[in-house]
Amino acid sequence: MNILIFGPNGSGKGTQGNLVKAKYNLAHIESGAIFREHIGGGTELGKKAKAYIDRGDLVPDDITIPMVLETLKTKGAEGWLLDGFPRNMVQAQKLWDALQQEGMKLDYVIEILLPREVAKNRIMGRRLCKNNNNHPNNIFIDAIKPAGDVCRVCGGELSARSDDQDETAINKRHDIYYNTVDGTLAAAYFYKDLAAKGQTKYVELNGEGSIDSIKETLIASLA
C-alpha cells in the first residue's frame, strides 16, 4: 500500500502517520529524511542537492523528485507513506508523472482537515514534559490539557519550545500550506481531482477529533 499524507503543522499528521505505519508495516518516509539520507550518504543526487543548499538556494524539482523516487523504491519496497512532499502544485504534478513512469501505484491520499486558527493554537499550546517529550500536553486541547504547569501524565515540569511560540514563523508555514492556488493544499487538491477520475483514492479526516477517533476513521477508510 502506497500513501501520501497531507495536513498542516499542528494537525497530528505525524501521529496518524506513525499509527498507519505500524498498522500496515509501511515505510514512513519524511521529506527531510530523504535529503539527509542522500546528502549524508554522498549519493550523486545528494551531492547535487548539497551544492544548491550550500549556496542557500532551493533544490530544483529535477533533483528532488528523483531523490524521492529512489528512496521510495529502496525503503518502501513493501509499501510507503510519504509525508511532507509534495509541497506545491508543480511538485504534485511532477511526482504523479514520475510515479506513472516508474509504474508505481498511489493507492491513497490522506488529507487531515483542520481550520487554520485551530492549527496555530495547537502549535502554540504544545508543552513538553521534562521527563518524556512524548507525554501529550496541550493547553488548548481539553482532552490533554495539563494540570497547571505540570505534566498531566507524570507530573513532570513542562516547557514550551521557542519555535512553537513564534507566531510569525507559524504563519509563514501555514501561508504555504493553506494556499489553494499553488501551495500545499493546491497539491492535495490535484490528487483529489485524480481521485474523482478513479486514478487514486482520497480520504478526508476531521482533524478536530480525538487521536483515537481519527485513527478509527482512517483505518476504516483504508480497509
Image (cartoon, rainbow, N blue to C red):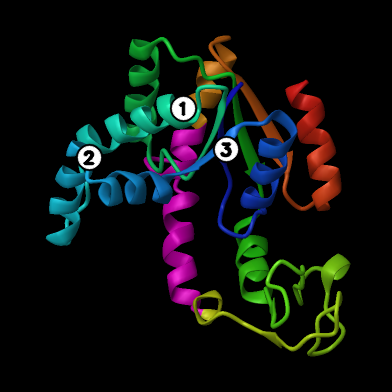
Nearer the observer, 107 or 134: 134
Can residue 179 be found in the magenta stretch? yes
Q: Nearer the viewer, mark 1 or mark 3?
A: 3
Can you give x and y, in whole percent of width and height, for residue 54 in the image?
15, 60
Can you give x and y, in whole percent of width and height, for residue 138 in the image?
75, 73
Residue extent of the magenta highlight: 166-188
Residue at the spot x=68%, y=75% of the render? Answer: 125
Residue at the spot x=35%, y=46% of the render? Answer: 37
SS of the residue at dot 2? loop
Furthest-front residue in this view? 41
* Neighbourhood count class around disc 1 (C-alpha, 10 Å): few under 14, some 14–19, many 20 upward: some
Gap in Å between the C-alphas at discs 2 and 3? 27 Å
Q: Quadrant of the C terminus?
A: top right
Name the disc covering residue 158, or none: none
The answer to which quarter of the image holds residue 129 is bottom right
* Left or right, 181 with reference to 189: left
Question: Looking at the image, how many numbered discs can be counted on the residues?
Answer: 3
Q: Earlier in the sequence, mark 2 or mark 1?
A: 2
Gap in Å between the C-alphas at discs 1 and 3? 13 Å
Nearer the observer, 48 or 106: 48
Nearer the observer, 164 or 187: 164
The answer to which quarter of the image holds residue 94 is top left
Q: Earlier in the sequence, mark 2 or mark 3?
A: 3
Looking at the image, do the residues carrying marks 2 and 1 touch, with CB atoms under 8 Å apart? no
Please say if 102 is above or below 72: above
Q: Quadrant of the N terminus?
A: top right
Q: Which residue is mark 3?
A: 5
Specify the amino acid type for callout 2. Answer: Thr
Q: Which residue is mark 1?
A: 190
* Left or right, 46 with reference to 172: left
Please say if 220 is above or below 142: above
